[in-house]
Image: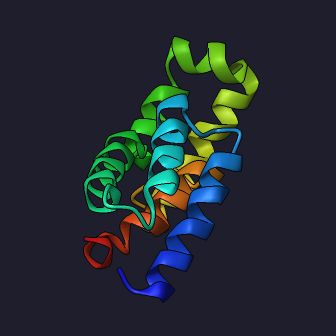
Amino acid sequence: MDREVLDFVVKKTHELMDAASCSSEAKAAAQVWLDAVGTDREAAETAKYIAELEADIVTVDGLISFAQSEAGASVFGADNAKNIAAHAREIKAAGAKYCDCPACAAVEAILEKKELMQ
């Protein structure tokens, strides 16, 4: 991986880990990947990291469905869940494929570089 791509992914990985919306699995995979950078484990951990990010990113349709569910109301609070669902419908109408929370935004940015990471 060239230095510019590596620096970008490292920066976005720290943003992901700092996001309140980052799952514990993504945070753990991010740390393992960071620890492997520059070692003989880097290529293998990069593949695992990409797989974890692809599994964790939330589609905008998934966000809408979750926000409109009882589980979403439980997590976000009933009123906030309605606002999140409305926001998700707005960003979907504008062409978004994924949730735009800080964690998903960082993951999306990383995944846009995945071909350059391998």
* Colour setting: rainbow
Q: Is residue 55 above or below residue 89?
A: above
Q: Which residue corresponds to the image point at 62% horizontal and 69% vertical from the top-left?
A: 11
> From what the image shows, is residue 72 above or below residue 84?
above
Quadrant in which the N terminus is drawn: bottom left
The part of the image, by quadrant, that contains residue 83 is: top right
Residue 43 location in percent, x, y?
A: 27, 62
Q: Is residue 43 above or below residue 55?
A: below
* Residue 52 seen anywhere in this rendered image of the structure: yes
Q: Which residue is drawn at the image coordinates 42% and 46% (left, top)?
A: 57
Q: Residue at left 26%, top 55%?
A: 47
Say which quadrant the C terminus sits in: bottom left
Query: In the drawing, does residue 42 fall left or right of residue 22?
Result: left
| Residue 13 locus on image (x, y percent) | 56, 58
In this rendering, would 26 be left or right of 116?
A: right
Q: How many numbered marks are there?
A: 0
Give whichever of 53, 48 is nearer the camera.
48
- Across and down, in percent, residue 70 comes to 53, 12
Of 62 and 26, nearer the camera is 26
In this orientation, which residue lies closer to the viewer: 22 or 43? Answer: 43
At 32% from the left and 55% from the top, the residue drawn is: 41
Q: Quadrant of residue 39?
A: bottom left
| Residue 75 image offset from top left, x and y in percent | 65, 19
Q: Is residue 101 visible?
A: no
